[in-house]
Image (tube, rainbow, N blue to C red):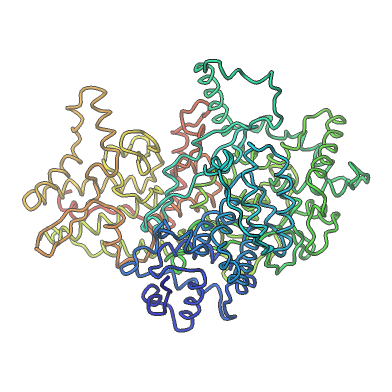
C-alpha cells in the first residue's frame, strides 16, 4: 500500500506550509489514506467534526502534536483538482473496506456522524491504534469495522450501548445487550445483530478464541445481508413515519456554489405506519391463503396519503396540540412548588423532567441524558448555569463540507455551537433539580420509571381538571405548534431538539442565524406557545465567538450585506460610462456592453428571486407575469412533469429591469441580424408579442409550456457572446460556469448567493413561513397551493412579499437601468 508523502500533499494543498505538511502526512498515513487522495474530502469532514467536538481525545487518538488546531483544516479549502480529480469522488477505492478499514469507516461516518457518537468513535479508534499489532495478527480489522458500520446503521440496534467513558464500559454494555438479544426467537430480525455485537465485544476485550468453521448458513444469516434504513415521525401525525433520504451524489460545482442536491427530491416520498408492538393471537391473523384485496389496499393507501397531507396543515385547534386551557393546567402543575412523591420519585424532580421535554421538544429518554456541564466544557450539549440563568448548549450540524466558502471574506461565518438562554420561569424549575457537575438530569433513573411517573402525574391532572393531556402531546407540542402557527422558522427547532428532520432538510441549507437571533426567536416562541411572558432582555456574553454579528450557525454560503452592496456598485460601474453612439458604432462594443448588461440583469434576478443556480433562468419573457407582479420559474423541475414549477413574487424594480431587458433584446436582434443571424432570429422570436397566434389548441399551448419551462431543453434569454481564438463570436447560455467566467473581476460569491440571502432577509423580517416556502419552493406534502387541505392564495402572497423584496433590493442599491443601446431609439 503506497503511502502519502510530502510532495504529493503539497501538490494537493498548494497553500499548506512546512509546519502543517509533516503533521498531515503522518495523520493521513495513520488513517490509511490512498496516495491519490480519493474521497479524502468526506474523511476530512469526519475528522473536522471530531476535532471540533473533542480536541483532546482527537489529539490523543491520532497522536498529533500540540500545535495542531482547527486552522489546519483550512489548508484543504483550496485543492488542486487538476492533478487529483478523485479528491471529491463519492465512492471509495476498490477494496478499501478490506485494505483500508480505518479510512473506510471514517468515510462511512461522514454522512452519519452525530455529535453524541464522536466520543465513542474516537475511543474505539484509540483502542484500535494502541492494540493494532494484535488485531492485525488475528486478522480482525475488517470484521471489527464492518460490525461497527452495520450496527450503527441498523434501526434495531440500541446505539446507547456504544456510549461510555472507556472501552471496558462499552464492552459491558454490549455484553448486557447480547444477553437481551439471546431471548428472541431464531427467526427474529434482532437475532441478526448478535454476531456483530459479539465482534465488538471481542474487540473491546481483545479476547478472541480460535475460529470455528461453520458448515452451513442459516436463514437468519442470509437475511442479514439486506439493508434497512432509519425512520422518523411525520410532523403533526399520530403514528405515521417516513424514511430518511440517503446521501446523494453531487458535483463539485454544486458543493462550491451552495446548491443543495437534496432539493430535487420531495421531503416526504415514503410513508410507513407503525406496527403494533403486541403480537396478535393466531386466530386474529389474516388467512395467508386469501386472495389479496386490491381495492382494500387502495383505500388504505389513500387514507394514509390523506392523513399525511393533513398532518402538515395543522391548525392551532388540532387535537395533536395542547389547547390553551390544557396548557394553563399543565404549566400550573409543572411550575408548582407543592411537595410529594409519584411512583416513588420526588414530584419536583418529575415536574422538571416533564418541563424540559415540553420546552425542548425532546422525548424523555433524551432529556434524561442531558448533563449539567461547566461553561467552558467541551461536551457537545448539556445544561449549565451562569449569572443566575440556565442555558442549553446545543449542537447544530454543519450544512456543507469543508470548501472554499470557509475562507471567503464576503460570506458570513458559521460555527456549530448554540447557547440558548432559558427564561426565568424555566430556570426556577431547573434550580429545584439541584444538579451536580457532570450529573445527568435523569439522575440514573431508568427511562421506563420516569415515563411511568410522568404518566401518573398527567393522569392525576386529567382526572382533576377534566382534560386530555398525554405524554405524546407534551413531547411533540413545540414541534406541532411551530408547524401549525407558521410564524417561526422550523430550523430553529433543531437547536432545541438537537437533531435535523425531513421537514427542514432543504430549508436548513439556506437558513443562517446568529446566537442572538436564535435566542430572540426562541424567547418569542416560548411566550406565544406557553402563554408565559418572556424575559425583557437577554443576558450578554452567551458565547465567546470573536465577531458577534457575523458568526452564526447554518448556511455557509450566506453573503454579507456590505459585500453585496459592493457587488452592485461594481456591476453598475461597468454600465455607468457607456454612451449610446459609442456602443452602437462597432459590433464588438455592442457585444461587450450586452454582456455587461446581461450580467447586471442576471445578478439582479438571482438576488431578487432566490432563483436556484441551475442554469438558464427565465427561458421566456412570457413567464414574466406583469399583471400579477409575479414570475413563473422552473429552477427545480424535470422535462415533462410540473414538479417544483412555481410562481413567485417579483419585486417592482426587477419587473422594471426585465422590461428594460426586453427592449434591449429587441435592439440586439436588429444589431445581430447580419453577423449572427441565428441569435438574431432567436431574440426576435423571444421578444415577439404574437408568438402564440399559431397555437390554436389547448394541447399545443401546453406542449409549448412544457418545452419552454425546462431550463436545459432550450435557448434562453440571457446569452453571452464570447470572442473565440479564431476571431468568431460564440453564443453561450447563462449557466453557472459561463456566469463565473464573466464574473472574474467581481467580488467572489457562490452562484446560489441570492437564494441564501433572500432566506436570511425574509426570516429577519419575521415573514410568515408559508410565504418563505412560497418564494423558495420548500413545500412539504400537503402544503402545496391548491392541495386538498391548503387555503393558500397566490395573489395575497405576492402582494405581501413584493414590498418586502423591494425594500431588500433598495437597501442593496439595485436600480432599474435602461440599456444604452435602446436610448438612441427611444
> Residue 393's x, y, as percent?
68, 59
Q: How many marks?
A: 0
Task: Using the image as rendered, state which of residue 630 and residue 522 is in the foreground.
Answer: 522
> Residue 685's x, y, as percent?
17, 39
Task: Using the image as rendered, state which of residue 221 and residue 308 is in the foreground.
Answer: 221
Q: Is residue 562 left or right of residue 638?
A: right
Please identify the residue farthest to the right as the structure is shown.
340
Q: Is residue 465 left or right of residue 417?
A: right
Residue 663 vs 465, above or below: the answer is below
> Residue 668's x, y, as percent?
15, 50
Residue 83 vs 356, above or below: the answer is below
Q: Which residue is found at the position 48% from the left and 64% from the top?
A: 100
Q: Is residue 347 left or right of residue 704?
A: right
Q: Which residue is found at the position 54% from the left and 33% from the top?
A: 271
Q: Which residue is found at the position 79% from the left and 54% from the top?
A: 441
Residue 779 vs 614, above or below: the answer is above
Amino acid at each position: 500500500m503506497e503511502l502519502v508523502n510530502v510532495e504529493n500533499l503539497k501538490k494537493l494543498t498548494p497553500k499548506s506550509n512546512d509546519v502543517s505538511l509533516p503533521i498531515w502526512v503522518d495523520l493521513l498515513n495513520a488513517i490509511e489514506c490512498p496516495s491519490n487522495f480519493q474521497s479524502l474530502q468526506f474523511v476530512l469532514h469526519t475528522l473536522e467534526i471530531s476535532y471540533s467536538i473533542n480536541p483532546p481525545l482527537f489529539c490523543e487518538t491520532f497522536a498529533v502534536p500540540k500545535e495542531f488546531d482547527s486552522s489546519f483544516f483550512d489548508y484543504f479549502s483550496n485543492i488542486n483538482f487538476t492533478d487529483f480529480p478523485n479528491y471529491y469522488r463519492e465512492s471509495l477505492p476498490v477494496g478499501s473496506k478490506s485494505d483500508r478499514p480505518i479510512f473506510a469507516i471514517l468515510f462511512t461516518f461522514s454522512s452519519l456522524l452525530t455529535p453524541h457518537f464522536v466520543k465513542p468513535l474516537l475511543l474505539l479508534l484509540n483502542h484500535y491504534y494502541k492494540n493494532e499489532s494484535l488485531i492485525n495478527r488475528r486478522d480482525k480489522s475488517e470484521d471489527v469495522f464492518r460490525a461497527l458500520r452495520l450496527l450503527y446503521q441498523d434501526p434495531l440496534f440500541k446505539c446507547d450501548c456504544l456510549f461510555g467513558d472507556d472501552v471496558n464500559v462499552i464492552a459491558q454494555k454490549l455484553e448486557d445487550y447480547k444477553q437481551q438479544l439471546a431471548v428472541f426467537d431464531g427467526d427474529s430480525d434482532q437475532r441478526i445483530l448478535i454476531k456483530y455485537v459479539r465482534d465488538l465485544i471481542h474487540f473491546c476485550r481483545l479476547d478472541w478464541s480460535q475460529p470455528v468453521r461453520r458448515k452451513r448458513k442459516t436463514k437468519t444469516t442470509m437475511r442479514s445481508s439486506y439493508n434497512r434504513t432509519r425512520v422518523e415521525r411525520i410532523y403533526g401525525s399520530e403514528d405515521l413515519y417516513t424514511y430518511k433520504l440517503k446521501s446523494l451524489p453531487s458535483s463539485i460545482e454544486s458543493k462550491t456554489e451552495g446548491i443543495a442536491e437534496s432539493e430535487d427530491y420531495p421531503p416526504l416520498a415514503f410513508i410507513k405506519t407503525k406496527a403494533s408492538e403486541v403480537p396478535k393471537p393466531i386466530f386474529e391473523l389474516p388467512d395467508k391463503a386469501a386472495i389479496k384485496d386490491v381495492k382494500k389496499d387502495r383505500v388504505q393507501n389513500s387514507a394514509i396519503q390523506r392523513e399525511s397531507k393533513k398532518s402538515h396543515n395543522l391548525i392551532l385547534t388540532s387535537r395533536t396540540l395542547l389547547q390553551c386551557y390544557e396548557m394553563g393546567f399543565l404549566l400550573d402543575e409543572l411550575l408548582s412548588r407543592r411537595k410529594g412523591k409519584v411512583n416513588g420519585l420526588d414530584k419536583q424532580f418529575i415536574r422538571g423532567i416533564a418541563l424540559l421535554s415540553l420546552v425542548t421538544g425532546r422525548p424523555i429518554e433524551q432529556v434524561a441524558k442531558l448533563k449539567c456541564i461547566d461553561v467552558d466544557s467541551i461536551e457537545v450539549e448539556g445544561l449549565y448555569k451562569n449569572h443566575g440563568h440556565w442555558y442549553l448548549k446545543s449542537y447544530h450540524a454543519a450544512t456543507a463540507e469543508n470548501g472554499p466558502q470557509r475562507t471567503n471574506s464576503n460570506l458570513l461565518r458559521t460555527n456549530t455551537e448554540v447557547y440558548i438562554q432559558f427564561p426565568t420561569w424555566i430556570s426556577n424549575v431547573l434550580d429545584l433539580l439541584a444538579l451536580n457537575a457532570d450529573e445527568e438530569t435523569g439522575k440514573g433513573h431508568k427511562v421506563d420509571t420516569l415515563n411511568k411517573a410522568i404518566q401518573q402525574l398527567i393522569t392525576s391532572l386529567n382526572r382533576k381538571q377534566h382534560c386530555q393531556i398525554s405524554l405524546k402531546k407534551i413531547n411533540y407540542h413545540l414541534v406541532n405548534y411551530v408547524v401549525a402557527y407558521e410564524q417561526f422558522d422550523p430550523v430553529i427547532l433543531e437547536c432545541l431538539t438537537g437533531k435535523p428532520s425531513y421537514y427542514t432538510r432543504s430549508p436548513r441549507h439556506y437558513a443562517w442565524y446568529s446566537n442572538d437571533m436564535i435566542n430572540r426567536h426562541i424567547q418569542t416562541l416560548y411566550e406565544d406557545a406557553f402563554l408565559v411572558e418572556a424575559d425583557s432582555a437577554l443576558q450578554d456574553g452567551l458565547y465567546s465567538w470573536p465577531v458577534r454579528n457575523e458568526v452564526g450557525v447554518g448556511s455557509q454560503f450566506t453573503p454579507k450585506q456590505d459585500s453585496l452592496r459592493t457587488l452592485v456598485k461594481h456591476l453598475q460601474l461597468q454600465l455607468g460610462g457607456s454612451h449610446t453612439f459609442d456602443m452602437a458604432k462597432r459590433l464588438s462594443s455592442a457585444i461587450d456592453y450586452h454582456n455587461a448588461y446581461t450580467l447586471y440583469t442576471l445578478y439582479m434576478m438571482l438576488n431578487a428571486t432566490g432563483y436556484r443556480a441551475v442554469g438558464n433562468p427565465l427561458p421566456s419573457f412570457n413567464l414574466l407575469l406583469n399583471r400579477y407582479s409575479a414570475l413563473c420559474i422552473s429552477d427545480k423541475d424535470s422535462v415533462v412533469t410540473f414538479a417544483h414549477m412555481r410562481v413567485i413574487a417579483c419585486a417592482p424594480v426587477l419587473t422594471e429591469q426585465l422590461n428594460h431587458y426586453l427592449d434591449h433584446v429587441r435592439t440586439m436582434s436588429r444589431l445581430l441580424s447580419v453577423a449572427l443571424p441565428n441569435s438574431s432570429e432567436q431574440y426576435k422570436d423571444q421578444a415577439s408579442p404574437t408568438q402564440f397566434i399559431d397555437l390554436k389548441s389547448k394541447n399545443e399551448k401546453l406542449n409549448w409550456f412544457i418545452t419552454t419551462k425546462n431550463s436545459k431543453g432550450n435557448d434562453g434569454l440571457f446569452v453571452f457572446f464570447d470572442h473565440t481564438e479564431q476571431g468568431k463570436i460564440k453564443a453561450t447560455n447563462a449557466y453557472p460556469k459561463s456566469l463565473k467566467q464573466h464574473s472574474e473581476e467581481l467580488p467572489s460569491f457562490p452562484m446560489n448567493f441570492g437564494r441564501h440571502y433572500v432566506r436570511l432577509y425574509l426570516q429577519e423580517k419575521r415573514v410568515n413561513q408559508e410565504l418563505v416556502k412560497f418564494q423558495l419552493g420548500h413545500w412539504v406534502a400537503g402544503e402545496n397551493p391548491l392541495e386538498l387541505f391548503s387555503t393558500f392564495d397566490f395573489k395575497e402572497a405576492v402582494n405581501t412579499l413584493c414590498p418586502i423584496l423591494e425594500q431588500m433590493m433598495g437597501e442593496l442599491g439595485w436600480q432599474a437601468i435602461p440599456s444604452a443601446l435602446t436610448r438612441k431609439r427611444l
